[in-house]
Image (spheres, helix red, strand yellow):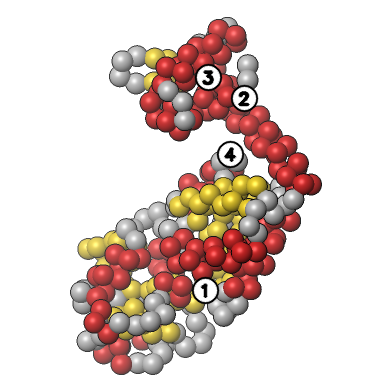
Amino acid sequence: MNLRELEYLVAIDEECHFNRAAERCFVSQPTLSGQLKKLEQELGVMLIERDTRKVSMTDVGTAVARQARKILTEVKAIKEITQSFEDPMAGELQVGLIPTVAPYLLPEIIPELKHKFPRLTLWLHEHFTAVLLEKLKNAKLDLLILALPVDTDEFSEIDLFLENFWLAVPSDKILSKKNTIQMIDLNEQEMLLLEEGHCLRGQALDVCFSAGAKENKAFQATSLETLRYMVSEGIGMTLLPELAVPKKRNKSDFICYIPFSDPKPTRRIGLLYRQGSYREKTYQKIAQVIKDKLSRFH
């Protein structure tokens, strides 16, 4: 038994498909299948049920795969220990971000992080919060950048900044004439929101409910950029996090971006990592760079 065989087993358990599992492990399908048969022979049990239509795990296969994840996580911890002693700001990190943060935050921070830590390689992954948390738990990701808090106490967090919400409204609407928006201005207004799965949807709903606004249930967007285009078409208004508000405004896009007056609706953005990680010093230094870079967001 070796670590590669355990990686193959975990991959087939999660993908339920030999070709996809092989692609994920960067090996050929015959190689992966052959190594798993070898593992079954060594253990003397059938781990995987195979037929022409589907691949599924036996009960013992599921149990072994669960234990294999723990082993692979511990192996990753050993590598983290050695890295933290050699140079905490070198090596590789698997970093996950939510879709409403990644495209707007990364251009701000990646050049600075590369300048400060040239020996550190960041592999970036964009998923919904639920997927990111599962991948962090299973040590497929090392660090998350997302909206806090999260409904779990098994991770450690570092606050980065508070991000204000802005109102994006078609330029021909009455609200577009205002310099600032008060929550009462949204009373009885209809808002365009993101689809289920985005944590920003829940945050925006909280703002809408507290202001007496309603959701336009005829449409749910897959991304903030889709919401922006809908507002530009004059179909409705929406809430955007401050990082998604363009620094240079183009009047031809028919959108007005208006800040809220105090008390401003906000969301907390921070880092999340596994408790007790030996790379905690690395995460703290990354957090400080981000804080310094985005100090204008309060």
Q: Which of marks 4 and 1 is nearer the N terminus?
A: 4
Q: Which of marks 4 and 3 is nearer the N terminus?
A: 3
Residue 174 x %, y %: 26, 90
User: Are circles 4 and 1 on residues that touch, CB within 8 Å?
Assistant: no
- Outermost residue on the right side: it is 85
Q: Earlier in the sequence, mark 3 or mark 1?
A: 3
Residue 150, compared with residue 80, is above or below; it is below
Q: How far apart are marks 2 and 1 (CA)?
A: 42 Å
Q: Which of marks 2 and 1 is nearer the N terminus?
A: 2
Residue 274 x %, y %: 66, 48
Q: What residue type is labelled 3?
A: Gly
Residue 138's tag is 4
Circle 3 residue:
61
Local SS, label 4: loop
Residue 248 x %, y %: 38, 81
> What crowding class fits label 1: few (fewer than 14 Cα within 10 Å), some (14-19), or many (20 or more)?
many
Residue 282 x %, y %: 70, 55
Which callout, 2 or 4, points to the residue nearer the camera?
2
Q: Earlier in the sequence, mark 2 or mark 4?
A: 2
Residue 163's tag is 1
User: Are circles 3 and 2 on residues that touch, CB within 8 Å?
Assistant: no
Local SS, label 1: strand
Local SS, label 2: helix
Closest to the observer: 246 or 160? Answer: 246
